[in-house]
Every structure is written in C-alpha cells, then in structure tokens.
Amino acid sequence: MLVVGLTGCGSASPKARYVAKLNAMCEDFARREQKIGTPGSPSELGSRGDRIVAAYDEAILKPIQRLKAPPEIASQAAQLRELARRQRNVLGALANAGKAGDLQKIRQLVGINQQLNDQAGQVARGLKADSCAS
C-alpha cells in the first residue's frame, strides 16, 4: 500500500515527461554544437558540417524517432519527427555544399534550415518545450 502511495506522489504527466525529454535532447544538441563551433565560412562548414550532422543524429534525430508521445500531443510529436528528418537532410546537404564551396547552394539551404528551425520552434513553443523553442 505504501509503495502505491509513493509512486503517485510527484509523478509528472505523460506530456510533461515527453516535454522534459525533448528539452534534454535540445540541450544535448546545443552543447554538442557549441563544442564543434558555428561555421563562419564555407570551408569551416565543410570541415565541421559532418560533425554537426553526426551530433544532430545522435542528440535529436534518433531519440525523437524513439520517443513515444502521449495521445493528446501525438500530432505535434509527428510534426517534430518529420521536421527533424527534413532538417537532418538539409544539414547533410549543407555539409556537402560547404565541402564543394557552393555559396549559392549554401545560401539556399541556410534559408530552408531557418524555415525548419522556425517551424520546429513554433511546435516546441506550443508544447512548452522551451529549450527547443529558440
């Protein structure tokens, strides 16, 4: 009886647990990205791009694909999974464009990446996943 009473105390809702995991993923990626450094030129993008993609895969893409959302936020979770998949593809293309020194392609992909960031941020704000909203 005591165990049953204790397990109910302070337990977060399924949505709160999901949001906490999202925040942890975004914080992990931000730390990894900070260690790699923000590329300031096509050559830096070429040399750091693959590391950024790998960090994104490990911190965001793989975990978000495994993360189960409660039914009340299933549609937002599906949106985030799709946006993460699309963003991963754009990051990979950015790394390749950096290696090739293709400035026009880099500019185009940076714009697409920003749009995806904005869309994911909007969904994250709706879920109150503040670490993912910026």
Image (cartoon, rainbow, N blue to C red):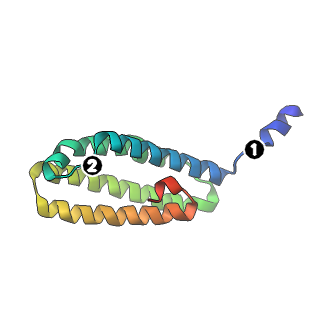
Residue type at mark 1: give it.
Gly
- Which quadrant would the N terminus be assigned to in this image? top right
**Neighbour tally class for label 2: few under 14, some 14-19, many 20 plus, Cα within 10 Å:** few
Mark 2 and mark 1 residues within 8 Å of each other at the beta carbon: no
The percent position of residue 125, horizontal first and vertical second, equals 52, 63
Q: Can residue 129 be seen here?
A: yes
Q: Residue 122 carries which label?
A: none
Q: Residue at image x 32%, y 52%?
A: 88
- Which structural element holds mark 2? loop
Q: Can you say whether 122 is above or below 9 in the image?
A: below
Q: Residue at image x 45%, y 55%?
A: 81
Q: Residue 38 carries which label?
A: 2
Residue type at mark 2: give it.
Thr
- 42 lies left or right of 132: left
Q: Nearer the viewer, residue 36 or 78?
A: 36
Q: Can residue 67 be seen here?
A: no
- 111 lies left or right of 30: left
Q: Can you say whether 118 is above or below 40 in the image?
A: below
Q: Nearer the viewer, residue 132 or 5?
A: 132
Q: Earlier in the sequence, mark 2 or mark 1?
A: 1
The percent position of residue 34, horizontal first and vertical second, equals 34, 43
The percent position of residue 101, horizontal first and vertical second, equals 10, 53
Q: Can you say whether 109 is above or below 29 in the image?
A: below
Which residue of the protein is positioned furthest toward the right in this rendering? 1
> Which residue bears the numbered disc 1?
10
- Which structural element holds mark 1? loop
Q: Which of marks 2 and 1 is in front?
A: 2
Instruction: Say which quarter of the image contains residue 6.
Output: top right
Q: Residue at image x 28%, y 65%?
A: 112
**Neighbour tally class for label 1: few under 14, some 14-19, many 20 plus, Cα within 10 Å:** few
